[in-house]
Amino acid sequence: MLPFDTERPNRAESFYRSNDALISELQQVTKALSAVLSRAAKANRTGTLRALSKQVVEAHRVAGDVITRARRLQDDTATFAATMNASSLLSEIVDEAKRLGLLDVHQRGDAILSFPTRMAVQGGLLRQYGKTVESTRPSIIASGLLAARVKAEQPSAGIIEAVFATYQLLVSARHDAIGDVVPITDVYAALTLMPAARDTYSETDLAFDLYSSIAAARNVTATGYSLSITGSTTTGPGRGHRMVARDGTEIVFSMVSFHKS
């Protein structure tokens, strides 16, 4: 994770923007130097190399200045690393998310709750759905929260029918009845019998789709059975898939069932 502090708001995002500006300048200097070298090669062939001396000196000066600033920025990284504060970074992410229009984003301790996802600092890493968030740039993370929101509001039309068909097979094999609960883990295993399927669709993806379908009121099959999700008394308190309601309430569930509407 990159450095930030609590004394200057949006320090992390400012750091990245400074980096962006520096990279842009470096690209321009590289382009200018390439042009100068090209002209120098031509001048060398025509015997007018001296005329380019001032341009070469100026290009060298600009490049040196940019390199010096890059080194200072690198030093800043080391200096602020020791003052890294998770709460400050999460606060910046919330600010960026609100700029994108996600006004119902909630920060609670070392976690961000934004329908339908939960993001939290665990072991010094920012994690979402059990996976480490690769970027620590607030604006990029906020864009990811927005993407999750858009996806949740447009759940897959066929997922409920596929899960219901699988659920029927599982309750039949167990000699249970429609309405009894089945672990999401078992549903996922039956849906992804081919190993390759698990590479592109995780159990967390399934949980996300199920919760999103309920939140969007698209959880009823063509035959009139409604999907329900619940926790489990056997997995222990707080165990299961975590999603977030629109009001910021955390939903923890590990079981699914269907009931005739």
Image (cartoon, rainbow, N blue to C red):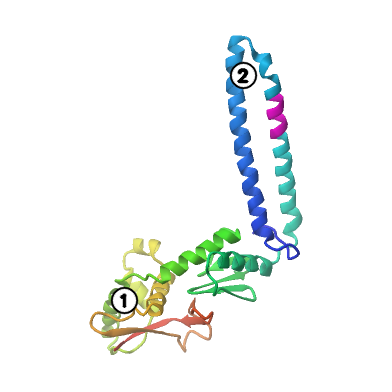
Considering depth in this image, is 256 or 160 the residue closer to the camera? Answer: 160
Can residue 126 be spotted in the picture? yes
Q: Is residue 79 above or below residue 128?
A: above
Determine the residue located farthest toward the left in the rendered image: 223
Residue drawn at the location 33% of the way across and 89% of the way down: 180
Q: Callout 1: helix, strand or loop?
A: helix
Please, is residue 8 above or below residue 157 in the view? Answer: above
Residue 79, image x, y percentages? 76, 55
Find residue 261 and report its horizontal and vertical position in percent.
29, 89
**Near-viewer residue (2 or 45):** 45
Q: Secondary structure at mark 2?
A: helix
Q: Which residues are magenta?
A: 56-63
Q: Nearer the viewer, residue 83 or 231?
A: 83
Return the residue at label 2. 40
**Residue at point 47%, 89% (across, down):** 233
**Pointer 1 local density, CA inside 10 Å: few below 14, some 14–19, many at least 20:** many
Instruction: State left or right for residue 23 relative to residue 252.
Output: right
Horizontal side of 140 relative to 109 (left or right) equals left
Marks 1 and 2 sit apart, C-alpha to C-alpha, by: 67 Å
Q: Earlier in the sequence, mark 1 or mark 2?
A: 2
Quadrant assignment, res 67: top right
Name the residue tied to disc 1. Answer: 160
- Residue in the image at 26% along x and 77% along y: 165
